[in-house]
Amino acid sequence: MKKISQRKRIVVKVGTSTLTHSTGMINIRKLEHLVKVLSDLKNSGKEVLLVTSGAIGVGCGKLGINTRPCDTPSKQAVAAIGQCELMYFYDKKFAEYNHTVAQVLLTKDIVQDDIRKTNCQNTFVKLLSLGVIPIINENDTISVEEIEFGDNDTLSAVVATLVDADFLVILSDIDGLFDKNPSLYPDAKLIPKVNAIDDYIISLADGSGSKHGTGGMITKIHAAQIANSAKIDMAIINGKDPDILYDLFEDKEVGTLFLSNE
Ligand code: GLU
């Protein structure tokens, strides 16, 4: 198996709970730190793609709405507001490190329609060859289904397969996959490596989510299934300190690795 430090094309997914405060406002300290680390990884020679959530969360924060709206028009409107704010932030912060970003908003049909899929792949290839960092989210504003059922863990795995990534990293608000729920059982143990996603592994994911996000462990396991079946290894690590990405790409043991065993 190629060492993780040798992986070049990497997809990093960050979720709403990592990039916002519980108010929905951007967690500036954390997001600035993440941008700095990703810029540095890019400087070290890696190709970086960032899948970001947070459009709805940040939109709520900007409007001072404390809970995620339930009706579709409100979610779509709030996502439109938040996506703009998010990209403004990323653009400004990556520019401080001399990196250019591109916004790519996707809907599920890119995997169902071959022409759209090829167009999308061509765009990614071109952006990466231009040295740009693509920043991807679901196109929540136009896609009802994406808002109702979509989650960015799955999206990140789809993006990883579209660009034939060497590695997928999901930044979570938990250290990785545990053998039982660590918030209920203090003796829960982190599982460092998963070689096969079987019924036992699936049973460990209880699907919990945060106030503004939609994911949970089950969507991360699902992402691992998609990535691994495309021979892409994946890690779930805790995004609370983005420096952990340095550890991961220096082959230190962090989080849970899902190995495709290619
Ligand atoms: N696309 C949604 C957003 O940006 C997030 C989906 C998710 O949390 O997985 O708010």
Image (cartoon, rainbow, N blue to C red):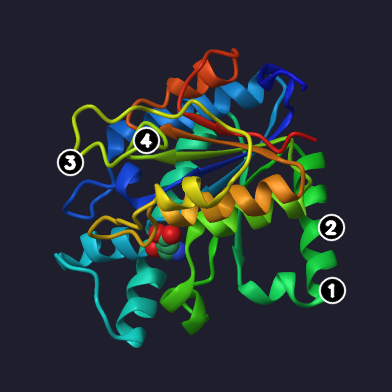
Circle 3 is placed at which residue position? 184
Residue type for callout 2: Asn
SS for dot 4: loop
Residue type for callout 1: Asp
Residue type for callout 3: Leu
> Which image quadrant for residue 64?
bottom left
Q: Can you name the residue that lies furthest to the front here?
A: 200
Circle 2 is placed at which residue position? 122
Question: What is the C-alpha distance between the residues marked 4 and 1?
Answer: 38 Å
Mark 4 Cα within 10 Å, few/some/many (few <14, many 20+)? many
Q: Is label 2 in contact with label 1 (beta carbons under 8 Å)?
A: no
Question: What is the C-alpha distance between the residues marked 2 and 3?
Answer: 46 Å
> From the viewer's perspective, is 146 left or right of 48?
left
**Residue at 30% over, 64% down:** 59
Question: What is the C-alpha distance between the residues marked 1 and 3?
Answer: 45 Å
Q: Position of residue 127 (x, y in %)?
A: 75, 48
Circle 1 is placed at which residue position? 114
Mark 2 Cα within 10 Å, few/some/many (few <14, many 20+)? some
- Please report whichever mark, 2 or 4, sits nearer to the chain's N-terminal start: 2
The label nearer to you, 2 versus 4, is 4
